[in-house]
Amino acid sequence: MSQDIVGDVGVAMRIAQKAGLLGGAFGGVKSPPFQTSKFYWPHWLVVDAATMTIAANTLYRCWFYVDATTTFLGGWFANSGTGDSGVVLRIGVWDAAGNLKKDFGVVTLTGAAATKQAANSVTLTPGWYQVGLVSSGTPALYTMNTLAFQSNVGLPSNPLAAKLGSFSIPHSANAVFNIPLGDSASFTYGALPDPITAASTTIFSYLSATTGTFPQMGLYL
């Protein structure tokens, strides 16, 4: 297939996506609908049992795709209970331009491992969003990592599958691209910013020796 044809197909797919003719899954096949009593995280990542100690006064954020107008009940994350008694976190969601859609509120940790929910409903229309959290302390949160090459949906290795807008990061040591997990920026704990103005200071990505995992976070119904 010529590069021109790939480009034309890519443009057509983006137009169809904006018109609501394509779902969030590969090849225009619509994704299963969001279901109640479920936790959702970025579609190209998996949650795991590893933990990472997050920094205080740092806004961690990841991209999240919504393919149908949905009312979410709030945001969630998972803490291990290690060193977090009395620590408070705040979680929210922004649109792709960085405008705050909902500050879900404050969650106080108690030293017990749990999936924490911040209940404050928000209705999101189809598109890309940023889910993020900031902490007053340094709790150890459970992490999520990449599906790697098990799925090419949205990954830049296949121009026809890259319609979800994922991007890559050079990684010379492995001579392949990295798959982004999220990023972080310096931000003093408090009410979430509207809009996000802090520049990214660290990019977390698969195949990175020091930043290969990212704290679990997402939206729930």
Image (cartoon, rainbow, N blue to C red):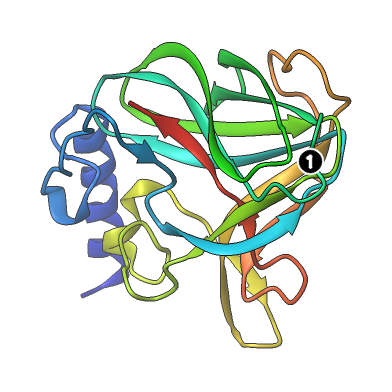
Mark 1 element type: loop
- Pinpoint residue 3: horizontal percent, then vertical percent: 31, 69
**Residue drawn at (63%, 88%) of the image:** 174
Q: Is residue 109 left or right of residue 19?
A: right
Q: Residue at x 13, y 43 (%)?
A: 30
Against 48, is 14 above or below?
above
Going 24% across and 36% down the picture, which residue do you hit?
17
Q: Position of residue 211 (x, y in %)?
A: 73, 65
Q: How many marks?
A: 1
Say left or right for 115 vs 23.
right
Q: Amino acid at mark 1?
A: Asp
Residue at the outermost bottom position: 174
Q: Quadrant of residue 36?
A: top left
Determine whether 23 is above or below 141 in the image.
above
Q: For the residue carrying disc 1, how many other residues have a C-alpha within 10 Å: few (<14), some (14-19), or many (20+)?
A: many
Q: Which residue is mark 1?
A: 84
Question: In the visual, does 80 lie left or right of 31?
Answer: right
Res 24 → quadrant: top left
Q: Position of residue 103 (x, y in %)?
A: 60, 14
Q: Where is 196 relative to 142, above or below?
A: above
Toward the viewer: 174 or 192?
Answer: 192
> Split into 4 quadrants, where in the image is the C terminus?
top left
Q: Quadrant of the N terminus?
A: bottom left
On the image, which quarter does residue 147 sit in?
Answer: bottom left
Judge by depth and name the residue closer to the eye, 87 or 69. Answer: 87
Write the residue at 15% across / 42% down: 32
